[in-house]
Each structure stands twice: as C-alpha cells, then as structure tokens.
Amino acid sequence: MTAVAAEETRTMGRAQAQSLGRRAARSLRRDRTAVVCFVIIAAYVGVALLGYAGLLPDFQERVGGSYEPPSLSFAKIFGTDIFGRSILYKILAGTQTAMTIGFIVTGISLPIGIILGALSGYYGGRVDAGIVWLYSVISSVPSILLIVGISYVLEKGIVAICIALGAVSWVGLCRLIRGEVLKHRNREYVLAVRLLGASDAVIIFRHILPNVVHLAIVTASLLVLSSIKSEVILTFLGVGIQNGASWGTMITDATGELVTGIWWPLAGVTSAMFLIIYALNVAGDALRDALDPKLID
Amino acid sequence: MGAYVARRLLQMIPIILGVAGLVFVLFTTVGEDPVRVALGQHATPEAIAELRALWGLDQPMWLQFVDFLRQIATFDYGRSFNTGEPLSEMFRQGALVSLSLTVFPYVLGTLTNVSIALLVAYYRGSLFDRFSTAIFVASMSISYLVYIIAFQYLLAYQAGAFPINGYESGWSGIPYLLLPWLIIMVVTAGPDIRIYRTVFLDETRADYVRTAFAKGASEAAVIFRHILKNALIPILTHVVIGIPFLILGAFLMERFFSIPGVGDIMITAIHNGDFPILKGLTVLIAIAYALFNLITDLLYAVVDPRVQLS
C-alpha cells in the first residue's frame, strides 16, 4: 500500500517535472505564427551554414550591368549593384555574417550572464557586491562608446564586433537571473536539498537554474536580434565590418544610392533583415508565453 | 532621506572609479597612439616628443590616471586633440543642441505612447490588440538607419516637406528639427508601447483589480482610476532612466541631419581618434546615469507610499 503510494507520488512528480517543457512545446506547436517564425529562423541559419560549407554563390561575381533594376531571373531578383554584382547574393553572404554575429554574441553573453547572475544571487555578500559593481560599471557606460573602445583595442572586423557586443550584452540577463535566484535561494526545496547535504554547485546548477533558465531562452532570441541590428549601426559608424558582405555595409552604401533613384539595394536588404528580426521578435514572445510559469493557468 | 541620499552618492564613487579605469585602459593604454594619428607616418622624433609633452602623454601611466581623475572631479576635461577647444565648453554647447533635438519627442512621445498602450491594453486580446501588436513588432524589425535614410529621402528630398539637413540655434532652428522629431517618435513608438502594454497587462492580474471589480466598479473606472495609477511606477522608471541618454543625443540623427550635438561630437571623435573627448563623454554620461538612477529610486518613494528608503 505504502509502496504503491510512494510509487504513485514518484511518477506524479516526474509527470509534473516534464510537463512544463512538454506543455511549452505543445503550446508552441499550436501557435501557427510562431511555427512559421521558427521555420524562418531555421532557414536563415541554413543559409549561414551553406555559406560556411562554401555552397553560397560568390557575391563578388558580375552577373549583369551596373545598377540593373530587379528582374525575373534568380540572381537579379533584387537587381544589381554598382559593379553589376547580384544584390541577392550579397544579401545571402550578409546573412552568413549577421547570423554568425547573432549566435556568437549570444553564445558569449548567455553563459556569462547565467553564471555570474547565479553566483551573485546565491552567495550574496562580497561576491554579489563585486558582480553588481562590475555590471553597474558596464551599464553606466553608453554601450556604443564601450564597443568603439574595444574595437580600437582589437582589429576592426567581425571578431571585434562579436567580442565587444558580447562584453556588454550579458548585463541584462545577469540582472534578471540574479533577481530570480535571490528569490529561490531560501525556498523550501533549496533548504531541503541543502539539508540532504548537496553541495552549492549541485544546488545552483541542478536545482535552482532549471527553474530560472526560461529567462535565458527568451533573452537569447532578443540577443540575437539586437546584435544583428547593432552590426548595421556599428558598420555605418566605421567600426564594424570592414571588408566582406554585411547588411551594414549594404545599408551604408544605400545612403548615397537612394538620392540617384537606386532603391533596390536598400529594399532588398531591408526586407531580408525585416523577415529575420520579425521572426526573432515573435519567436521570443511565443517562447515567453510558453515558458513563463506565471502565465500558465 | 538625507542619509539615504548621502549613502547612495558615496556608492557612486566606486562605480565612477570603475568607469574611469575602464575608459582609461581602453582609450589610453591599448588604443592607437594619438600622437601618431595626429602627425602621420613621417613625423620627426622631435615633433612627436613635443606633442607628447603638450598632451601630457610623456608622464608615467599612474600620473596620467591621477590627472584624469582630477579632471573628473573638477569637471575640467582639458582640450580636444584635434581642435584644441576646451572640452567643457564643447560639451555644454553640444548638450544644449542635443537636448533641443531629443527632449520634445521624448515628452510628446511618452504621452502618446502611454495613451496608445492604455488603449491597446483596454482592448486586450481583441483583433485590434493583435493587429496593433503586429504593426509595432513590424516597426521594430526595421533598422534605425533605414528609417532615417527613407524618411529623409521621401519626406525631405522627394516631397520637399522638410529641409534636408542643417541646424540653427533658437526658434528659427525648429523647421530643421521637425523631421528628426518625427523619426524619433516613430522609431520609439513600437518598443515603448509594447513595454507599457505589458506593464498595464501585468497590473490587470493584480489582486486590487479583482477587488475593484468585486465592488462593482466599471471597466473604465478600474483602468483609469486604479490600473493607470499603479502602472505609473514602472513607467516612471522607464522614462527617468532614459533621460541621461537624451544628452548623448540621437547620434545617428545628428549625423544625418548635420545637427552639431553631443552625438555628432562623439562620432567625429571616434573617426579622428580624439580620445580626450571620448574619455570625458563616457565619464559624464556615467555620472548622469548614476544620478538619474538615484532620482528614480527617490521618485519611487514619492509616488508609492509603500516604498521605504533605507
């Protein structure tokens, strides 16, 4: 009898532990807009991977005359640029750059934000004071100046952009995680595992973090999109991508072209950027709705 | 209250020191050599040594850092490498220009965005809500740069409704500012309305809302009398924290419309490697940011009687 009851509690416990993730997946599948957006994101990642496999068409190659407006052939669907190169191929090559920056910056800031936030919230005291001081310093400096400073130190280019953006973008997540961990630190389940003799590392990483990690997932989609947007601004300011294709260089070039009536490079690159940023925005919202335990009735 | 303010001001010191250290390391010790940048490749060693001495770069590092700290404490940031102008004067003039660009759209934009957000929150879940959310997200999915380029081309260059660029001080400068104001308001509408909408929706889930409804209050009364007042607290934070960045100006806007504000000064300094400007600006903004953080917390206590400053 007791054994059965215990077994029942155990399976119930397991069912409930899985249900947040499973329920999230189910509610995401039901949200058709979200599904479309995830497909779009996957397609952009696919383009970037094709680029790394060397399978994207060479954007440096001439496909027609200078500044041909859009026409119904694959390479010239968005027209050509001043050297007769395909705008579409440039956009695809720029996609590789944008996705690389988006994912590397996120890959740098997520672990920093999660680990520092968790340590700060869990230990408090001097550790907390030090970490709070660090992110207060970073968030007091206008990020544009910090990024420019870092890109002076490193060689200008994609690596400098990634490191500079990564160095400033973990702050928001760190704050969020710190606040949540602070709330969880004295919850009963944490006291219980501590009584059972669990080490701090086990408590933080096995017990507390799974309860707050949904914040990181939502933040990740926002980090990817804000880094893609930042690349454009930084490149315009002359501290971004120096050579090679990027959406930033294309938009910067478009400033001069538009006055002479050449609208298609700007139109092409803006549509490409619009699609991925919109998809990431909607995906972020859908993830928040699906993962936030407060919003699940 | 007085003790609280004093303690908070003291807490600012390590942060400002940290900022000073950070920009000092970035722009002095590891950046490009400004003397080389200014004099070019073929400068004589004597000329280099002379300029070095003039800019104080021949001093040991720790002395340069102490000197930088003295500049911060006395608000005297020395002179620009490129023009020789005193920076305090440049910043003062630039800040006035930047504020004339950013304050008006900030105030008007906040009022309209809060109103729209309230409206959207009132019709939450309706087709109107979903449609407007889609529009706002779409508006956030276009680069800031594209807004400026497209608006300047279509409204100023093609339609001729506004001057293409330029700036004049005083009232006669307003025609030049109209288009930048419009762009700033359009660009900030999407993200702001979404934040405010979330704030309002969070409040609708609070207990006091259920109580108010239980008392028989109408939907409109609950929204305008109860929710609006409570939502003002997070809205206030969002608004006050944004103020220091008004001084920095909308730097892209200043660049495109030739408006000589702080942002324009900053971008020029970036291109010329004018490190005194970059260092001074960074620290000033950091101080402003810390001060407005403090003001936000004080306002909390004023607006919300439940908050105790300790």
Image (spheres, coloured by chain):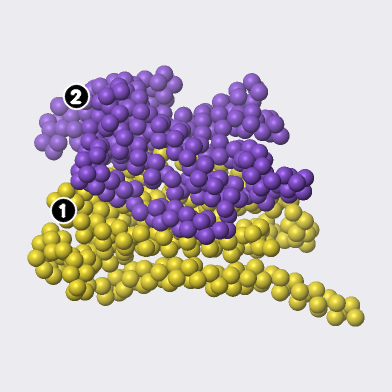
Chain colours: A yellow, B purple
Label tally:
2
Q: Give the image quarter of residue B294.
A: top right
Residue located at (24% from left, 56% from top):
A266
Q: Give the image quarter of residue A146.
A: top left
Q: Chain of mark 2?
A: B
For mark 2, give the secondary structure: helix
Relative to B266, residue B211 above or below: below
Residue depth check, mark 2 versus mark 1: number of the one nearer the observer: 1
Q: Where in the figure is residue A215, as x and y percent of width and height?
A: 57, 57
**For the view shown, which residue lies furthest in the left direction?**
A65
Residue located at (54% from left, 50% from top):
B120
Left or right of B260 in this view: B140 = right
Relative to A169, residue A47 above or below: below
Q: Where in the figure is residue B127, as x and y percent of width and height?
A: 52, 60
Camera-side residue: A127 or A5?
A: A5
Relative to B215, residue B91 above or below: above
Residue on which the image places disc 1 = A261
Q: Give the image quarter of residue A96.
A: bottom left
Q: Is residue B276 visible?
A: no
Residue located at (75% from left, 59% from top):
A189
Residue located at (72% from left, 44% from top):
B217
Is there a contact, CB below 8 Å, between mark 2 and mark 1? Answer: no
Left or right of B157 in this view: B86 = right
Residue on which the image places disc 2 = B50
- The amino acid beneath tag 2 is Glu
- The amino acid beneath tag 1 is Gly
Mark 2 and mark 1, same subunit? no
Q: Where in the figure is residue A203, as x and y percent of width and height?
A: 68, 59
Camera-side residue: A192 or B147?
A: B147
- Crowd band around label 1 with a 10 angstrom C-alpha radius: few (<14), some (14–19), many (20+): few
